[in-house]
Image (tube, rainbow, N blue to C red):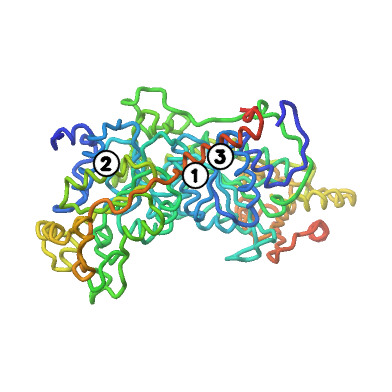
Amino acid sequence: MKKSTQYRLLQGNEAAAEGALAAGVRFFAGYPITPSTEIAEILSVRLPELGGKFIQMEDEIGSIAAVIGASIGGVKATATSGPGFSLMQENLGYACLTEVPLVIVNVMRGGPSTGLPTSPSQGDVMQARWGTHGDHPIIVLSPASVAETFHYMVKAVNFSEKYRNPVIMLMDEVIGHMRARVSLPPWSMVETVNRIIPNMPPEWYVPYERTSMGVPPMASFGSGYRYHVTGLVHDEQGFPTGKSSEARDNIMGIFKKIERGFREVCLVDYHRMEDAEHAIVAYGCMVLSAMSAIEELRDDGIKVGLIKLGTLWPFPRFALEHYLPQLKTILVPELNMGQIYREVVRVDMGRAAVEKINKINGELITPDEIIKAVRGLAR
Amino acid sequence: MISNAELVKKYCRHNKKFPHIWCPGCGNGIILSGLLRAVDGLGLRKDEIAFVSGIGCSSRAPVYVDFNTLHTTHGRALAFATGLKLAKPELTVIVATGDGDATAIGGNHLIHACRRNIDMTTIIFNNYIYGMTGGQYSPTTPHGAHGSTCRAGNIENPFNISALVEAAGASFVARTTSYHVMQLQDLIKKAIRHRGFAVVEVITHCPTLYGRLNKAGGAPEMLKWQREVAVPKNKAAKMSPEELEGRIVTGVLVEKELPEYCDLYDEIIRQAREKAGRGGENE
């Protein structure tokens, strides 16, 4: 990559790989899986050029485990999955509790099970939120274009480092495999965030003592700060505890740090919402259908706009709440049975009429279908 | 040789985590002490050691010692250790795992770690049973032996861990028992020194569960049994298969020089950088 802005024809998956590299990711572990394999293939070439490392593990369980190990070793790390996301759930919970930064790219495909391997889907939205056992916070981003994939990937790595929490890049097959001409900024223009590392002498280091930001500084293994990391609920020293007060502090601590960063991690965009009476709430590839539907509906004089969710979890409820007083109806098109729809209903609390369009057969929801639905609602 | 008191003072997190969770008579402490004596004998610095484990009684070992310690999920220790070693090749990575952790839920990670030959040492505490959950049969429980989930006797056949890891490609394999404490520390030393993936299988005893369920006696009787069944490799070479029936062959079983993964990857990096011209221009 050159020093100036560069225009390239990129696939969504390539943009994710380039974004990871620009954000400083230097370790990748993965397992071949459609539709995210390109990310692994690209990084297997690009990482060693930058002195980084790539490893193909025996399964996705091992992939995320290796990524956690590398991150504890002080290297920014990422892994990919499609349906293998199911296998990653165990250690995803481990990373949440031990507060190890990492990014997982899940390019969703039709499910359940082996499902529709080469067809798009948005079926993993709830799994991304609640897939691992136990209460835990999570950050989930969902890009809606190739260019956005690059920028969101950088943000995903930055959020994971800043909050010491796993971040899921929840892409769909359309965005992953779409090609577009995108401008990539030179790396010197890419804002990157690194985890806070301890600056006190090792004997004063309390591994899980939170700073005022709510995030404990993280020493990498081998840096002179010897400490214990465990998936058991632990005290500030990092040692297992069964004490209820310490258990509460541990779990509440991981929630609070994300609550504190709520506004920052919630990426939302609005399109033609100023005077909108009807809103489409969309994310991922559904944004493309929604955008084109809105142009046509506006030509017909229907006041419709788009609330585009870049972050799915934590759910950016304020984005809806802000516009609810002016809205008559909300339409939620999704390639699942209505996973974000339920969140919209929850936040709406009966104020606007909320409707959904769903497809789970591997086909997209077309602009025409959205136009028809909005016309029906606006009538 | 370093005394017990000195060993504890030098390496244990004595102010934090004791008493430990192991039952009276458990063999795990003997193995941990063997490891610490090996580390001391090799003169390794505490900062350069990463001690990784999975889940189970044996996997509680890291919490007690003052290294960089990583207590992971069930069966996954080797996969975590793989990522850690690649990120920080200068670390001496040691993995503690049990028979259930390493060969049941973690069996896949174990064979692939053997095949990759990444420089680390895996100590498998083999007590033939799941101790922490109450004595269920494991992949190494002998045929006919009893566990809390095989009251009538185990109808499955056990893994021979050392043979398994040898077949999977481990470049160093050794076996001993918790009775043979001098051999134990010597083998762990050799395993750590070995450049490549090294496995030390340690036959140990669980008097609380395996001992009771199989009427094998308490810790002293079980230790005596280990002494009786152990046969050094040289002696075993002269024995017939019938004579070796029910015996445990000890010593260094495999030791070969194979290219190590991190070394090979460094070469990949060198070539990639050369090919990419100045490489890392944007770093």
Report, in whole angstroms, how far the alpha carbon at label 3 lies from the one at label 2: 30 Å
Q: Residue at x 16, y 63 (%)?
A: B211
**Disc 2 chain ID:** B
* Farthest-out residue, front: B238
Q: Judge the density around disc 2: few (<14), some (14-19), many (≥20) Cα neighbours within 10 Å.
A: many
Q: Front-most of A30 and B72?
A: A30
Please check whether the numbered discs 3 and 2 fall on a single chain: yes
Indicate the chain on which mark 1 is placed: A
Which residue lies at the image location 18% right of the left edge and 43% below the top edge? Answer: B19
Which secondary structure lies at badge 2? helix
Q: Cα distance, mark 2 to mark 1?
A: 29 Å
User: Which one is earlier in the sequence, the residue at label 3 or at label 2?
Assistant: 2
Q: Position of residue A342 (x, y in %)?
A: 61, 57
Please say whether residue A263 is visible from this viewpoint: no
Which residue in the protein does label 3 denote? B268
Q: Secondary structure at mark 3?
A: helix
- Mark 1 touches mark 3? (CB < 8 Å): no
Q: Nearer the viewer, mark 1 or mark 3?
A: 3
A257 left or right of B194?
A: right
Residue that badge 2 annotates: B189
In the rendered image, which quarter is residue A156 located in? top right
Residue B120, placed above or below residue B249: above
Q: Is residue B64 left or right of residue A250?
A: left
Q: Amino acid at mark 1?
A: Val
Can you tell which quarter of the image residue A198 is in?
top left
Q: Callout 3, which amino acid?
A: Ile
Task: Write the residue at 26% across / 38% down.
Answer: B65
Residue A96 in the image: x percent, y percent? 46, 45
Q: Which residue is mark 1?
A: A67
Disc 3 to disc 2: CB gap under 8 Å: no
In-image side of B120 versus A194 (left or right): left
